[in-house]
Structures are given as C-alpha cells and as structure tokens.
Image (tube, helix red, strand yellow):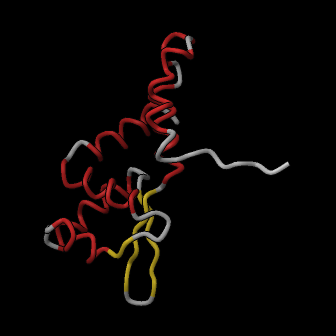
Amino acid sequence: MEQENAILALAALAQSTRLETFRLLVEQEPEGMAAGDIARTLAVPQNTMSAHLNVLSRAGLVTSERRSRLIVYRADVARLRDLTLFLVKDCCGGDASLCAPLIAELTPCCPPLKVSP
C-alpha cells in the first residue's frame, strides 16, 4: 500500500460514525449488511449513513453490491490487511520478538487455517 492510500483510509476512519460502521461491517463478514440496517443499528439517519459509506467506499475500505432492491456493504478485509501491514511492516527494527504481542492479539480472532498434508 502506498502512503497516500494509507492516509486516505486512516482519514476515513478518523470519524466516530465511520469507524463504528467499518467495525460493524468487519463483524458482519462475509455476509455484509444492507445500508438501511447499518443506519438503524447505529441510529444514524439514512442520508447521513449514505454519506459516511461513500467516504469509506472512496477510501477502499468497503465495497457495495446491489441485491435486488438493497445495497449490501461489506468491509474490504484485504484492504484492512494491507493497511495493517503498511502500519507495522517495519515494526520493531526487524526484531520479531517485539512484534510478538501484536501478533498474539490478532491470532485469537483470526486463527490460521490448518493445511492438510
């Protein structure tokens, strides 16, 4: 990820409703959530939520898909991964043991897939 893209993503998340929206969509992966349901869950007017979703979409953090009459939004987990890697890529001056606590915190939510022999 380039610095400009990281700044755009971080700026999009630097507002409480957008951050809550993104976190909600991460929780809803992989199904996603309809725009109206997001607005109701977060108690935000639909037109305001639409503006927030547009900012997140322009930053590449969410994607949308029309399903009949609904627009379903999903968190772009690959973009989240890229942003996280951008932030910690040169972590700890190459001393992996210093980054171990960060890795340990992330592992319980997303255990690695077991590959069968």
Count of marks overlaid on the render: 0
> Measured from the top left, where is residue 77 in percent x and y?
49, 52
Where in the figure is residue 18, as x and y percent of width and height? 25, 54
| Above or below 65: residue 6 | above
Whether residue 45 sits left or right of residue 81 in the image: it is left
Q: Is residue 57 above or below residue 40?
A: above
Name the residue at 52% across, 36% down: 1
Quadrant housing residue 69: bottom left
Q: Residue at x 41, y 36 (%)?
A: 6
Q: Residue furthest bottom?
A: 68
Q: Position of residue 33 (x, y in %)?
A: 37, 72
Residue 43, position as x, y percentages in the image: 14, 68
Residue at 70% over, 48% down: 114
Seen in the picture, residue 81 relative to 105 is either above or below; the reply is below
11 to 72, vertically: above or below: above
Of the pair 14 and 77, the residue shown nearer to us: 77
**Looking at the rendering, which quadrant does residue 87 occupy?**
top left
Residue drawn at point x = 86 percent, y = 48 percent: 117
